[in-house]
Amino acid sequence: MAPAATSAAVALPATVDGARNATDVMFLQMVLAHHEPAAALLELGQSKATRADVRGLAGDLATALAAETRTITGWLEAWGEPLVSTAHADAHAAHGGLPALGDKEIAELGRTGSAEFDTAFLNMLIGHQHGAVELARMEATSGQNPQVKELAKRTDETTRAQIQQLLRMVAG
């Protein structure tokens, strides 16, 4: 089974227009924060998954994630914006908070036996991907920059397709 398209499947523009609002900046910063634990999760999936389709999906998503991270970093740097939000963590509570996937959860998954790993990995990835959809919808509603809004739209569409694919993979 081929992996669902990723938001980075179609190359993002290397530069971004200057017009932006605080939501655009926050969205990009939160996407970067969301990508950090995802990269560790996908690396674990590539190295520990027993099913070839799970390993392949983890590899494809990791490649797309790295490309998207580079582009978003470039956009924020071009705007002179920090890569990490300076807002207090409680400021994010109204839209789901900061990423829930962390070192503890990834370490626990790493200790999962090989017989259970693939299903546990897929379920953890499904949960994590729901956060990306929520971030994208926040940007679509309140963002200003057309390129950032397009990234959010693509993220919403492709991540929902990925979640459907992951659910089918869990079902076997």
Image: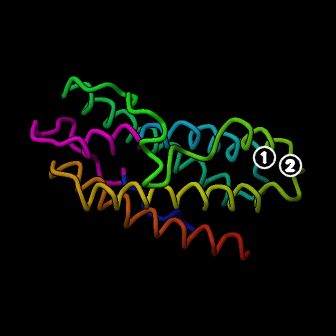
Image spot of residue 49 (x, y percent): 75, 51
- 131 with respect to 11 (left or right): right
Numbered label attached to residue 21: none
Q: Quadrant of the C terminus?
A: bottom right
**Going 72% across and 41% down the picture, which residue do you hit?**
106
Question: What amino acid is found at the position of numbered circle 2 in the picture?
Answer: Thr
Question: What amino acid is found at the position of numbered circle 1 in the picture?
Answer: Leu
- 85 with respect to 90 (left or right): left
Q: Quadrant of the N terminus?
A: bottom right
Numbered label attached to residue 109: 1
Query: Is residue 22 placed above or below 172 in the rendered structure?
Result: above
Name the residue that disc number 2 marks. 112
- 59 with respect to 110 (left or right): left
Residue 146 falls within the magenta-colored stretch? no
Q: How is the image coloured?
A: rainbow
- 58 with respect to 83 (left or right): right
**Going 16% across and 48% down the picture, which residue do you hit?**
145
Question: Which residues are the magenta region?
Answer: 8-31
Give SS at disc 1.
Answer: helix
Front one among 133 and 54: 133
Image spot of residue 113 (x, y percent): 90, 50
**Going 43% across and 54% down the picture, which residue do you hit?**
94
Query: What count of labels does the image hold?
Result: 2
Front one among 18 and 117: 18
Number of other residues with Cα within 10 Å of mark 2, as a class: few under 14, some 14 to 19, many 20 or more: some
Image spot of residue 69 (x, y percent): 40, 37
Give SS at disc 2.
Answer: loop
Number of other residues with Cα within 10 Å of mark 1, as a class: few under 14, some 14 to 19, many 20 or more: many
Image spot of residue 90 (x, y percent): 48, 41
Cβ atoms at labels 2 and 1 below 8 Å apart:
yes
